[in-house]
Amino acid sequence: MTQPPPEPPQHGPHRPPQIWDTRFDPRSAQPPPQSPSPSAPLPPPSPSPEQSLADRPTETGFGPPQLSPFTASALADGSANGLRRKRRTGLVIALALLLVAGAATGGWLLWGGDDAHPVARKTSRPHRVDARLDWVVPAPQAAPSGTGAAAAWFAHGNLIQADKNNVVAYAMDGGKRRWSLPVPGDTCGTSREADHDTAIVLYGAAGRFECDQIMAVNLKEGTKRWAHPLPENGTWDSASISMSDGVINLASVGAWASYAAEDGHAVHRPSLLADGCADRGSKVDRAMLTRVECKSTLNFLMRVDRKSGKEQWIWKAPEGTEIKNVISTEPAAVVLALSAREGFGDIVVLNDKGRMGAKISLTEGPYDPDCEAVRLNSCRRIVVADGILYIPTKPTGGPDGTRRNQIAAFDLRTGKKLWSTDVGGVRVNRPVAIHEGRLLVYQDALQDEGGKVASLDLKQGRAKPYMRLPAESADKEHQLANLGSVYFQDGKLIIAGESSGDGEASALVFQ
């Protein structure tokens, strides 16, 4: 017997029209053929011209051909080759010397320069094409594990990271430690972004995996604004956190909570939802989009007015699909997946009335947004700017053992692909940021070389070199970039991630 469709959210007699727009490509509703790879549940169609281009070992100034990239096994195997051991040993020794040299001042000396003396760098100085490792964030003795937290915040000229038991700020210019704030427990999650000098840390006071406390951090002063126990009816280690207009919203499995950013007092939110429906997180930018679960199905998206808190429209996802992530608020763009399968299927764009418009198939390409399904605003390998989505394809292996991929640009309003490019070289690429009217793309380190940064024009995707990173730190660079995040801030490239607690680094800063 079929189950009745989930009820839409209700909150009173006067409400804007609901959008039951279920136009959808019927092919997406059919289970795709079984993938030959367990890591790619939604397989691509036959190779497109762009894929064929990506398979060519072409080079345009971004590194020599025929070089094998790192693999997970090579990183784990200390006996992979003598060159790796020497470079790793050199990096450890150099980091140790930096630590000793900076211990007296509590800071870090810059690594590199034109002579043997540390040289201070001004952020306004033009970037170095042959970049150097300026400084490192030392790895804590005990690192957080599996938090899914943002790797770094940036505020007041500082790079700020939360480790297992502390939140620490380092000066972007030189890496000197500015302040350190103890976490009264074990960190189990953070907000991915900060709002008005406030960031959120979730931690467990009773144990590492018991996420039952919330703390607001003042990123300007390096102090605790407030801390409270979390409601006992939620599982908060996978909470989606959003902040806007002085209010912090948390959505978890089974519960949601709101707090005033200034003093932490509980904020009452009038329920806009019907019985059996629950708030599952929001993405806030110029608009606020809330993902709603009804009867165990994530199939509603609600646009909420940021000032009044009133619902503006509700969109129901097509039958058989779930809303997995929100990548843009204006235009509203969501990542969908088939309910019965893992992985992502399509990006659907909604207009200002909440009606479905353009669609971008993620299985074509196939494209890799690298999103967490349980947390909104978690897609690490995309850039959205001025209504344009920049997204990489999944890497493919060549006959020579190399791996490479492409970067594609889509107009979110029309769904039209504007261009795609392999960027050049035998590297895996990810978009990082828009800088001076161009797209910066990070290219992973190879076994014999550090990573690179290419600068692409936004109209056609033509690439030119922007930064070449040193080989000495290539091992650690690849380790952090593989599961971490890449940022471009104050003229510097930052690669940050969860540290393994190996005594080396949890972030590398290049200039």
Image (spheres, helix red, strand yellow):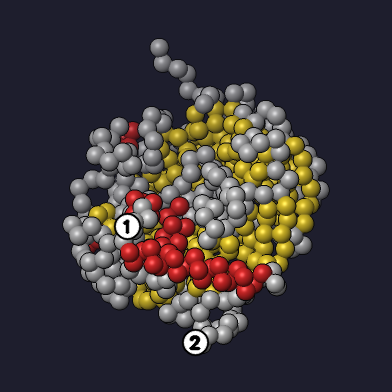
Are discs 2 and 1 less than 8 Å apart at CB? no
- The nearer-to-camera label among 2 and 1 is 1
Amino acid under disc 2: Asp
Query: Residue 199 placed where, x, y %?
Result: 68, 53
Q: Mark 2 falls on what kind of element?
A: loop
Return the residue nearer the eye: 208 or 409. 208
Q: Amino acid at mark 1?
A: Ala
| Quarter of the view holding residue 491 | bottom right
| Helix, strand or loop status at disc 1 | loop
Image quarter of residue 15: top right
**Label 2 Cα crowd, 10 Å radius (few <14 / some 14-19 / many 20+):** few
Q: Is residue 439 left or right of residue 74?
A: right
Q: CA distance from mark 2 to mark 1?
A: 32 Å
- Which residue is label 1 attached to? 80
* Residue 127 x %, y %: 49, 80
Q: Residue 414: where, in percent of width, then height?
A: 39, 54
At a point 43% along the width and 57% down the height, the residue shown is 479
Q: Residue furthest top?
A: 1
Query: Dot 2 corresponds to which residue?
Result: 114
Q: Residue furthest bottom?
A: 115
Relative placement, left or right, of 43 versus 22 is left
